[in-house]
Amino acid sequence: MVNFSGKGGRLHSLAALLLIAVLSACSGGGQGPILGGVSVSTAPVAPTVIAVSPLPNASAVAINTKVLTARFSLAMDPATLLATSFAVACPSGTVVTGSVSYVAATKTASLTLPTTPNLPANTTCVATVTTAAIGSNGLALAAA
């Protein structure tokens, strides 16, 4: 800690005026973070996928896997989570559709595949949630 002492009321007055001028120049008249103000963005944010199962680039996924999940950063509009907005392609280009459900409490959508056939062995499958999935704030899923 530094203590200033000495003579000179003028020096203290000048320092106070300088501090006021600097703070006034910052962030619109002293309303910024320097004085403890909070800068808040009111722009809505697009939802994103924050977790998936199976994991990305997973190997040795069982061919009888029937449920794939995607967890979102924001609440989603369940009416937009459909087989057309959440699907898996095995191999690439061959879409396997199923039924999609959504649990609002966990912000998680599940794609349940048909009981038959199994996923093809030794094949790369790609699950996709498209921008047709809409957040409860009205914004489309952010493109990856």
Image: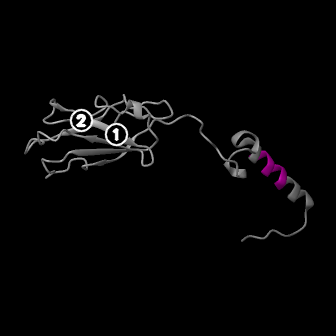
| Residue pointed to by mark 1 | 101
**Crowd band around label 2 with a 10 angstrom C-alpha radius: few (<14), some (14–19), many (20+):** many
Q: Is mark 1 on a helix, strand or loop?
A: strand
State the SS at label 2: loop
State the extent of the magenta-drawn residues as a range.
15-22
**Residue placed most toward the observer, 32 or 21:** 32
Instruction: Identify the residue at image location x=12%, y=39%.
Output: 116
Residue 99 screen position, x and y as percent: 27, 36
Name the quarter where the C terminus is drawn. top left
Between 41 and 81, which is closer to the camera in this rendering?
A: 81
Q: How far apart are marks 1 and 2 (CA)?
A: 10 Å
Q: Main secondary structure of the magenta part?
A: helix
Residue 5 falls in image quadrant: bottom right
Left or right, 66 with respect to 33, comes to: left
Q: How crowded is mark 1: few (under 14 residues within 10 Å), some or many (20 or more)?
A: some
Nearer the observer, 52 or 6:
52
Q: Where is residue 85 in the image (x, y as percent from the top left)?
A: 31, 31
Q: Name the residue under label 2.
A: 98
